[in-house]
Image (spheres, rainbow, N blue to C red):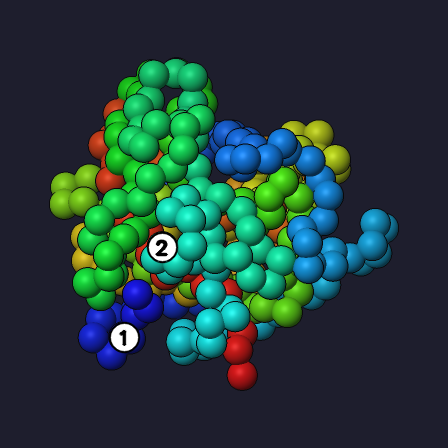
Amino acid sequence: MRLISSLLGFTTLALSVHALTACGGSAPAPAATGGASNTSASPGASPAAAGSPAPAPGPTTVSDKECPQDYWIDDMESGAPNQIIVQGGRRGYWYTFLDSQGSTISPPAKQKFIMSSGGHNNSAFAARALGKISATGDPVYAGLGFSFANPKGPYDASAYTGVSFWAKIGPGTNKSVRLKVPDTNTDPDGHVCTECFNDFGADLTITDTWTKYTIPFAKMSQMEGWGAPLKPSIDKSKLFGMQWQFNNPGQNYDLWIDDVSFTGCP
């Protein structure tokens, strides 16, 4: 079920974000359920030709208005229970991922993702991941996400200005989460990066009540101190998906995500 904005607050990322206390590499996006990973273009999408300049990321401030259905990425209610809404060339799947250092996650990684009951605005379902980050080891991480295409490939989001979603955490769990949006320069399947997974994104502090988060592409950045290449802005013409990742050692986490959408409608 889609949201009713007037009932709940929203947060728009504009000039600053809350930094995570731990950095480091992240996991690759696994191949989507039912398809082998490759770099073919998403059906219906038209990524920019190889060697052409990336499009400008867009405005640094975007509207948080509710966009029409063709902007929706997933409302967790439509179609297959672990697949995003199939439209506009988007047909990817949800998954979870974690390190090899002893962190835990549910639903389990490398298995079919299952939605959880109880979404935003009393809707039936939301995407949820919970567990604990290992207190030792390097790097430590866990999270959930989805691919835009199946089989895995780049998706052209040039028509949009950013992303929005509703989120909350379980009471008493870790509030710091990194939104990651892998593109052709940071995902290994882009065949560009030599030190991969430093995806463009934003460090967020999530509350324990459903809140809307709106992040313009122009405000997404890579983390400092690692990764190659380091680019001035995300290449929104060749995106691979979205991820929400935890890194804080020894911390319990319980993250709920609902009503994921692109921004930029008139």
Location of residue 264 by image quarter: bottom right
**Residue 4 falls left or right of residue 260:** left
Q: Residue at x 54, y 83 (%)?
A: 266
Camera-side residue: 38 or 230?
A: 38
Q: Residue at x 59, y 35 (%)?
A: 35
**Can residue 200 be seen?**
no
Distance of label 2 from label 1 (alpha carbons): 16 Å
- Find the residue positioned furthest to the left: 171
**Circle nearer the viewer, 2 or 1:** 2
Instruction: Return the mark for residue 76.
Output: 2
**Residue 129 falls left or right of residue 190:** left
**Residue that mark 1 sits on:** 4
Q: Earlier in the sequence, mark 2 or mark 1?
A: 1
Camera-side residue: 84 or 3?
A: 84
Q: Residue at x 68, y 54 (%)?
A: 43
Camera-side residue: 93 or 157?
A: 93
Local crowd at mark 2 within 10 Å, few (<14), some, or many (≥20)? many
Task: Judge whether 133 appears above or below 85 on screen.
Answer: above
**Mark 2 falls on what kind of element?**
loop
Local crowd at mark 1 within 10 Å, few (<14), some, or many (≥20)? few
**Residue 217 falls left or right of residue 15:** right
Task: Judge whether 231 appears above or below 87 on screen.
Answer: above
Q: Position of residue 115 (x, y in %)?
A: 31, 44
Q: Position of residue 62 (x, y in %)?
A: 49, 74
Location of residue 213 by image quarter: bottom left
Residue type beneath disc 1:
Ile
Q: Position of residue 123 (x, y in %)?
A: 24, 61
